[in-house]
Image (tube, grey):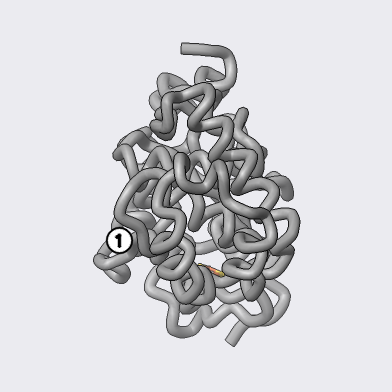
Amino acid sequence: MNKVDNFWEPGVSSGPCKVRNISRRHALITLAQLEQTYPDATCALRYVSPWQLLVATILSAQCTDTRVNLVTPALFARFPDPFSLVGAPLGAVEELIRSTGFFRNKAVNLLGCARAVVESHQGVVPQTLAELVALPGVGRKTANVVLGNAFAIPGMVVDTHVGRVARRLGWARSGQPQGVEKELCALLPKEKWTQTSHVLIWHGRRCCRAQIAHCSNCPVRERCPRTGVNRAK
Ligand code: SF4
């Protein structure tokens, strides 16, 4: 295992937590309550292969999953795999993904990613964090989405919802996604990482919203320090 994969590998999850006041036990009980509240929490992107999940996740940057799901059927019908996308005209890809925003950058990244997967991985999406983040347009968030959902390899996905909810719950202090990822991976056992991401995203969208936290209806209001919450109802 290389250095990137080993950055905050488990092992740390069994030791004492040094980065926050919330105990691991407290966090796990809170997480269990959230899992009970959102038993269907899962990845909202539609895909039938690791490659398609990788593409959909790249497209989801600065875009809703709903919008991505509207765009990908036509994209995947024409370019279903990295081999077909390698030779695709850039303009055709741009048109197919235009409504997801930042479409020019995303199209370049998709073509670059397809080329890298074909040339360096025989057309097969790699299954390590280090190999995934080496692909054009793929950061840690995208890589962890693919690991956790396409390969069942635990990955802690930190998007804006996960970061915000984790800080409010007292599970993390960092204002940076990579810092939050590190803190959550240290706090929670590895087997919980992927589902924690799903549950916090769902909770952030439905209850612990960015502008107003709906604390009075929150299933974990008795266990939450509400750190940094400015507006609640
Ligand atoms: S109590 Fe409020 S701040 Fe805490 S998780 Fe629930 S909605 Fe978010």
Give neighbour class at mark 1: few <14, some 14-19, many 20+ (Cα, 10 Å): some
Q: Is residue 42 left or right of residue 71?
A: left
Q: Position of residue 221 (x, y in %)?
A: 46, 71
Q: Position of residue 19 (x, y in %)?
A: 62, 35
Residue sitting nearer the eye, 165 or 195:
195
Instruction: Write the residue at 49% across / 35% down.
Output: 185
Q: Position of residue 82 (x, y in %)?
A: 47, 42
- The type of residue carrying mark 1 is Glu
> Which residue position holds label 1?
35
Q: Is residue 164 visible?
A: no
- Of all residues, the one furthest to the bottom in this rendering is 233
Instruction: Write the residue at 58% across / 59% down.
Output: 59
Picture quadrant of residue 62? bottom right
Instruction: Write the residue at 37% across / 42% down.
Output: 148
Residue sitting nearer the eye, 164 or 78:
78
Note whether 21 is above or below 10 in the view shown.
Answer: below
Picture quadrant of residue 137? top right
Q: Is residue 70 left or right of residue 136?
A: left
Note whether 77 is above or below 128 in the view shown.
Answer: below
Instruction: Write the residue at 58% across / 76% down.
Output: 209
Residue sitting nearer the eye, 104 or 54:
104
Q: Secondary structure at mark 1?
A: helix
